[in-house]
Amino acid sequence: MRPERPRAVTINDVAALAKVSIATASKALNGRGQVRAETRDRVFAAARELSFQPNPLARSLVTGQTRTVGLLTSDSVGRFGIPVMLGAEDAFGSGETAVLLCDARGDAFREQHYLRTLLARRVDGLIVVGESTDPRPSISRDLPIPVVYAYAPSDDPADVSFVPDDVTGSGDAVRHLIALGRRRIAHVTGPTHYTAARERAEGALGALEAAGLPLSGGQVVYGVWSQRWGRHAAEIVLNADPDVDAVFCGSDQIAAGLIEAARERGRRVPDDIAVVGYDNWEVLSQETRPPLTTMDMNLELLGRTAAQHLFAAIEGRATSGVHRMPCRLVIRDSAAPPALQ
């Protein structure tokens, strides 16, 4: 004879133990309606004593929410998207919200397929994670749920977007070099069609101008995001100004290549040339010789903040516009005061 399964604890049991109505117990547990603090505490104490687990379907019928959200990414490589998604998942986990992750791999048709799938799952909201800080087309106007954009901002100013503050971050990188006593500072970065390259150049030039210093070599050296370009750019920078004493690079890849080429030309880093990178890609920044001083975009914090704002948007408290998140300087050994002569 099979033993009987223990009966599942219901909200009726919680209400009976707390000596309140079922409606009051439901309001207290779901945070809806006016319930006195003393009553709410009594209901929660009863729920803990009975090890009550709310029925997700029943709760969704009461609240109109499924406590699930969609996380849609286009960053198939994951270099920037993964830290953003990890930060978002941390925030969703603390809010007891399930996450449905979809990777569109930069394909517009795949993205539309996943949007239909997420809507069919009745997600409460959506975070869209981009692969670069270039603006992307808005999808918000076609969706019945709140959408927050992370890393790649929406092209619609009415949407909610979170991006790293590359202008201030790059300015801080150059100001650090100036504070170390460097005066002939060059800037090497990626392609001009990238928003990140343009904004990092803007921040670097602004910091130099504020300090009354010229840009070493006279112009920003644009190229590609690669170590090979960093090695080639080192030749350009050193030929343009043999007395250059610092280089701010628009990415860690560029900085790693530049350090390698500078060493081959007999320039010591940081004694002769101080180098600062961008991204804090630790597989590079901690392994260069010497380890690289670099700007960290705080992508996990950006993801957590985007998730917190999605919660607010779900509750009808969205804050539209592009929100620029602070970056932080990670100081290692590639930037120091000039060596004493």
Image (cartoon, rainbow, N blue to C red):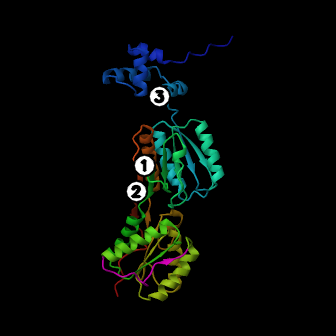
Label 3 is placed on what type of residue? Thr
Mark 1 touching mark 2, by CB under 8 A? yes
Question: Mark 2 = which residue?
Answer: 325
Q: How many marks?
A: 3
Q: Is residue 322 above or below residue 97?
A: below
Label 1 is placed on what type of residue? Thr
Task: Tell me, for residue 305, which label it has, or none.
Answer: 1
Residue 83 magenta-highlighted = no
Q: Which residues are magenta?
A: 211-223
Q: Is residue 195 left or right of residue 19?
A: right
Mark 1 or mark 2: which comes first in sequence? Answer: 1
Mark 3 touching mark 2, by CB under 8 A? no
Mark 1 or mark 3: which comes first in sequence? Answer: 3
Residue 216 magenta-highlighted = yes
Q: Between marks 3 and 2, how big is the CA–CA gap?
A: 32 Å
Few, some or many C-alpha atoms within 10 Å of disc 2 (few <14, some 14-19, many ≥20)? some
* Dot 3: element: helix
Q: Which mark is nearer the camera, 1 or 3?
A: 3
Question: Mark 3 = which residue?
Answer: 63
Few, some or many C-alpha atoms within 10 Å of disc 3 (few <14, some 14-19, many ≥20)? few
